[in-house]
């Protein structure tokens, strides 16, 4: 499986649905932080978790 390119799929235009719910996004950040370590992939996981987490509303 090629993970180097972004996933693509048809997405309904009406009604517009969120790609992720807030709960799903918070779970993704939490799980990414569990993968964070000193490996190159772990550092990428931490960077992604911090980037996504910073975009989520507080609360």
Image: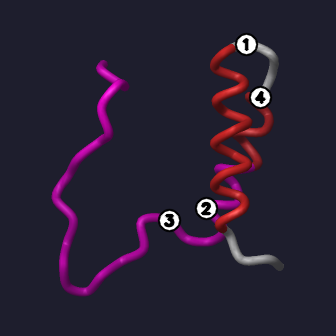
Q: How is the image coloured?
A: secondary structure
Q: Position of residue 25 (x, y in %)?
A: 62, 60
- Between discs 1 and 2, the one toward the N terminus: 2
Disc number lying in front (2 or 4): 4
Vertical side of 11 occupied by 38: above or below: above
Q: Which mark is residue 39?
A: 1
Q: Residue at x 64, y 29 (%)?
A: 44
Q: Return the x and y of residue 10 as percentages of the image width and height.
A: 16, 58
> Mark 1 and 4 residues: CB-CB less than 8 Å, in contact?
no
The reply to whether discs 3 and 1 touch (Cβ–Cβ < 8 Å) is no
Question: Which residue is labeled 4 in the image?
Answer: 36
The CA span between labels 3 and 4 is 21 Å
Q: Viewer-proximal residue, 44 or 26?
A: 44
Mark 3, mark 1: which one is toward the viewer? 1
**Which secondary structure lies at badge 3?**
loop
Tell me, yes or no, whether the two marked residues, 2 and 4, touch with CB atoms within 8 Å.
no
* Tag shown at residue 20: 3
Q: Extreme top residue here?
A: 39
Residue at image coords 36%, 77%: 17
- Mark 3–mark 1 Cα distance, whole angstroms, equals 27 Å
Residue 34 x, y percent position in the rendering: 79, 34
Instruction: Please determine whether, in this image, residue 1 is positioned above or below residue 35.
Output: above
The structure residue drawn at horizontal position 78% and vertical position 39%, both measured from the top left corner, is: 33
- Magenta stretch in the rendered image: 1-29
The earlier-in-sequence mark between 3 and 1 is 3
Secondary element type, mark 2: helix
Pointer 2: what residue?
Answer: 24
CA distance for labels 2 and 4: 18 Å
Give the number of the disc on residue 28. Answer: none
SS for tag 4?
Answer: loop
> Dot 2, crowdedness within 10 Å: few (<14), some or many (≥20)?
few
Answer above or below: position of 9 versus 5: below
């Amino acid at each position: 499986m090629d993970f180097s390119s972004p996933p693509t799929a048809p997405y309904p235009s009406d009604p517009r649905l969120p790609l992720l719910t807030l709960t799903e996004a918070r779970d993704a950040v939490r799980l990414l932080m569990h993968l964070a370590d000193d490996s190159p992939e772990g550092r990428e996981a931490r960077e992604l978790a911090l980037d996504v987490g910073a975009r989520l509303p507080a609360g």
